[in-house]
Amino acid sequence: MADIIKEILKDLPDGKISEAYFEGANIVLYTKDTEFFLNNEGMIRSIVNKIKKRIELRPDPSVCIDAEEAEKVIRSLIPEDSKVGNIIFDGQRSRVIIETEKPGLAIGKQGSILREIRQRTFWVPYIRRMPPIRSKIVDNIRAVLYANNDHRRKFLDRVGHRVYDGWLREKKHEWVRVTYLGAARQVGRSCMLLQTPESRVLLDCGVDVSGNEDAFPYLEVPEFNISELDAVIVSHSHLDHCGFVPYLFKFGYRGPVYCTAPTRDVMALLQLDYIKIMRNEGKEPIYTSEDVKEMVKHTITL
């Protein structure tokens, strides 16, 4: 068990927490005590203020009511005017994602409806605005995440251990080194390698869509080793910033890709389109749709 979780558990009553996991940089505690889940008297908040990390308390999956029954309760509590769409249950993580056209109505005054859903179902509700125009491709991209929820839970926990193992409260002497692997004195193929004593992170990994030569980041530099890469951060969804990311997964990278949710969806759309364009031009695509799918499975939205 990571040191940071041990420190958190010291400040909580014995026997209240059944499991503790990481979800990336977030810490998730599971409890089988429904009373403690609904009212922990500010204990979680005080620990958050103490260690300055995001902590979430969820019910253990064993205490959540049946998903079919929970959906009936949710639809009965949320006003019809909010126009609820899909309700997606993530049983591994005790979460339910509720899509609605009017999130404000679904949340209720000061979160009253969300609280009642928690009290009656012991699921943790998340409200998501339903897009005005549905896209099958975007739906498929998001379905990848829910279809692989066991893989996601293990992946996020692994990322968290990479972040927190060896965690110390004290500050340490640090250094930072930045190496440009693309986009220096050039428009396109943006890619920077950020190195610290603890991490190796790529800031963007794009392609130059207009050029045949020097179209891809220069990954042959001595500083870059894909087996030592800890994370990729994508600033936005233009191909000159994200078009080369699936190539990393083609060659074995299995770490996190950090971006916003809209960037994740648009990025995957453009990458699939990039594969199609290369085929139409008679070129061999540098990666496949399976590599894009693998990338989506490893995204962590900010």
Image (cartoon, helix red, strand yellow):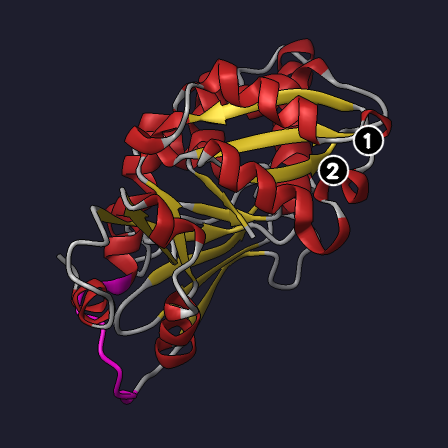
Mark closest to the chain's N terminus, 1 or 2 = 1
Q: Is residue 134 left or right of residue 174?
A: right
Q: Position of residue 269 (x, y in %)?
A: 67, 26
What residue type is disc 2 on?
Ala
- Are dots 1 and 2 in contact, CB under 8 Å? yes
In space, the residues marked 1 and 2 are separated at their CA atoms by 6 Å
What residue type is disc 1 on?
Ser
Can the viewer see residue 242 in this picture? Answer: no
Q: Is residue 299 left or right of residue 19?
A: right
The numbered dot on residue 219 is none
Q: Position of residue 73 (x, y in %)?
A: 59, 24
Which residue is label 1 attached to? 82
Identify the secondary structure beneath mark 2.
Answer: helix
Q: Position of residue 70 (x, y in %)?
A: 52, 23
Q: Nearer the viewer, residue 290 or 139?
A: 139
Task: Please name the residue shown 24% across and 46% down the image.
Answer: 227
In this rendering, the count of numbered labels is 2
Q: Nearer the viewer, residue 76 or 102?
A: 76
Residue 149 painted magenta: no
Q: Which residues are magenta?
A: 164-173
Task: Please name the residue shown 50% across and 41% down the image.
Answer: 119
- Vertically, is 210 above or below 167? above
Which residue is label 2 attached to? 106
Q: Is residue 254 left or right of residue 102?
A: left
- Give the overall secondary structure of the magenta segment: loop
Task: Please name the residue shown 38% across and 35% down the image.
Answer: 93
Q: Position of residue 200 (x, y in %)?
A: 34, 61
